[in-house]
Amino acid sequence: MPELPEVEVVRAGLQAHVAGRTIARADVLHPRAVRRHVLGAEDFTGRLAGLRIAAARRRGKYLWLELSDGEALLAHLGMSGQMLVQPGDAADEKHLRVRLVFEDDGPELRFVDQRTFGGLALADLVEADGTSLPGPIAHIARDPMDPAFDPAVAVRALRSRRTEVKRALLDQTLISGVGNIYADEALWRSRLHWARPSDRLTPAQARTLVDAATEVMAEALAQGGTSFDALYVNVNGQSGYFDRSLDAYGQEGRACRRCGSVIRRDPFMNRSSFSCPRCQPRPRRSN
DNA sequence: GTTACGACCTGTGGGC
DNA sequence: TGCCCACAGGTCGTAA
Ligand SMILES: [Zn+2]
């Protein structure tokens, strides 16, 4: 699903609805949802009972709940994960994977995930570059909404890679939070073709791209994120509206808003890249 | 260490 | 109706 703006919408919902509450019980309904918790589902549920949720945090597309014992409940939504705040008497969702029940009388927190690429795990917090992070994601780069994000660092990282610029932009260890939608939008705004060699971008081009990614994700967050269907929703099951503002992603056959050319689709990493043939010409060889 | 690819899942929509 | 294929907001393990 969910790229940075959509995950941030979920984080804010968790902060509002579960921070400060104490977990009474956790149920794992599908073992694959906790496959990253190496000690297994029993250990996972056993250790959560009785812990209080202090805060909901995020880096890139990863979320975590800071717990009262100093651990973190780390979550990734994968392609189809949802965090839903639901009354306990609401019927189980078809793809309900994990349920958290609280000691108060308030609603449950449900992790629902059709494709099961997402998951939850308990992890220790570690110190990385002056920031407390769950150990398993200590290698993930800062995202553009991080107050300590340094665009110059991201520019250097992108230009150090011998690969296509879109591959670099999607590499979460260089800059985090960008996925297929916002990569295509940032490239369109920067007038760069996705196959341009990342290490041959000028510093100014790379900076334009980083700034475009930052801006498009901020605009998307203001619209509640991007959603084409009921798979991508906030904790109350509602979709965002940024799909109306997309200029490239999913726009094959439509006119480019800038030049009127017909937006094309190319196969890319078993998915798609959308771009404008005139604004984003294919690289010849060396640029 | 870097890079590229298929695997991991479930579901939907289109063509025949 | 049904079958088969293409495709979907992501990462991860493996191999070169
Ligand atoms: Zn154009």
Image (tube, coloured by chain):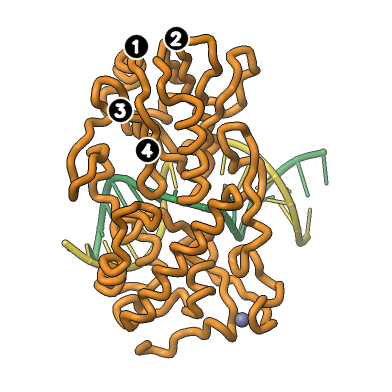
Chain colours: A orange, B yellow, C green
In which quarter of the view is residue A286 placed?
A: bottom left
Mark 1–mark 2 distance (CA, rounded to whole Å): 8 Å
Callout 3 crowding tier (Cα within 10 Å): few <14, some 14–19, many ≥20: many
Q: Residue at 54% of width from left, 15% of height from top?
A: A106
Quadrant position of ligand 1 = bottom right
x and y, in percent, of residue A159 in the image: 28, 74
In which quarter of the view is residue A86 placed?
A: top right
Q: Decide: marks 3, 1 in contact (CB < 8 A)? A: no
Callout 4 crowding tier (Cα within 10 Å): few <14, some 14–19, many ≥20: some
Return the residue at label 1: A50
x and y, in percent, of residue A248 in the image: 60, 69
Amino acid type, callout 3:
Leu
Mark 3–mark 1 distance (CA, rounded to whole Å): 14 Å
Of tags 3 and 2, the one toward the viewer is: 2
Amino acid type, callout 1:
Gly
The answer to whether the beta carbon of the residue marked 1 is less than 8 Å from any atom of ligand 1 is no
To the question of a shared chain for discs 3 and 2, the answer is yes
Of tags 3 and 1, the one toward the viewer is: 1
Of labels 3 and 2, earlier in sequence is 2
